[in-house]
Amino acid sequence: MIPELIGGHPGLAWLVGGLLLMAVEALAPGAFMVWIGLAAVGTGLATLALVLSFPAEVVVFAVLAAASIAVGLRLRRRARPSSVNTPQSGLVGRTARVLSVEGREGRVRVGDSDWSARLDAGADWPEQARSLDVVALDGCVLVVRPQAERS
């Protein structure tokens, strides 16, 4: 009964195919099949509303697929914060402990990692307090400032 119903109405075949593609996306997420599924659903709705020929259906599907993928890529780009997973996002604001000093540069420990460090402009290495704040990152060198000089 259902195959005959779908076979007699190409718009329903597009709708069912689109819904199946979106279901596949729900079961195995990859953020791609949903856009093709949306294009197929849109093609099915257009076919039901306008009674299109098969070549016209293919053109509508191709246009909707390209548009939906473009929208998906734009949304994906916009949703990705630029500061996530950068070294600076995890180190700035943390406390460092002085390991060694040589002029305005030295080695510090942040958590369980040792880093090259450089004093922030206008700061001096602390005499007694050996804790520093990481204020910036310059390549792989931490820019630090003594905690006593915090403002």
Image (tube, rainbow, N blue to C red):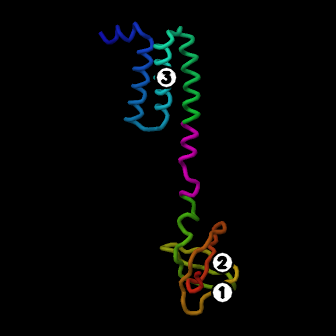
Q: Is residue 149 left or right of residue 21?
A: right
Mark seen at residue 37: none
- Amino acid identity at mark 1: Asp
- Amino acid identity at mark 3: Gly
Residue, far front: 49
- Amino acid identity at mark 2: Arg
Tag 2 secondary structure: strand
Real-space Cα separation, disc 3 to disc 1, in angstroms = 65 Å
Real-space Cα separation, disc 3 to disc 2, in angstroms = 58 Å
Is 73 magenta? The answer is yes
Tag 1 secondary structure: loop
Packing grade of label 3 (10 A; few <14, some 14-19, many >=20) is many
**Mark 3 or mark 2: which is in front?**
3
Q: Is residue 77 left or right of residue 10?
A: right
Residue indicated by mark 3:
42
Q: Which residue is at 55% across, 26% downward? A: 65
The segment highlighted magenta reads: 72-84
Mark seen at residue 124: 1
Residue indicated by mark 2:
118
The spot of residue 56 in percent (x, y) is 57, 12
Identify the mark nearer the N-term, 3 or 2. 3
Tag 3 secondary structure: helix
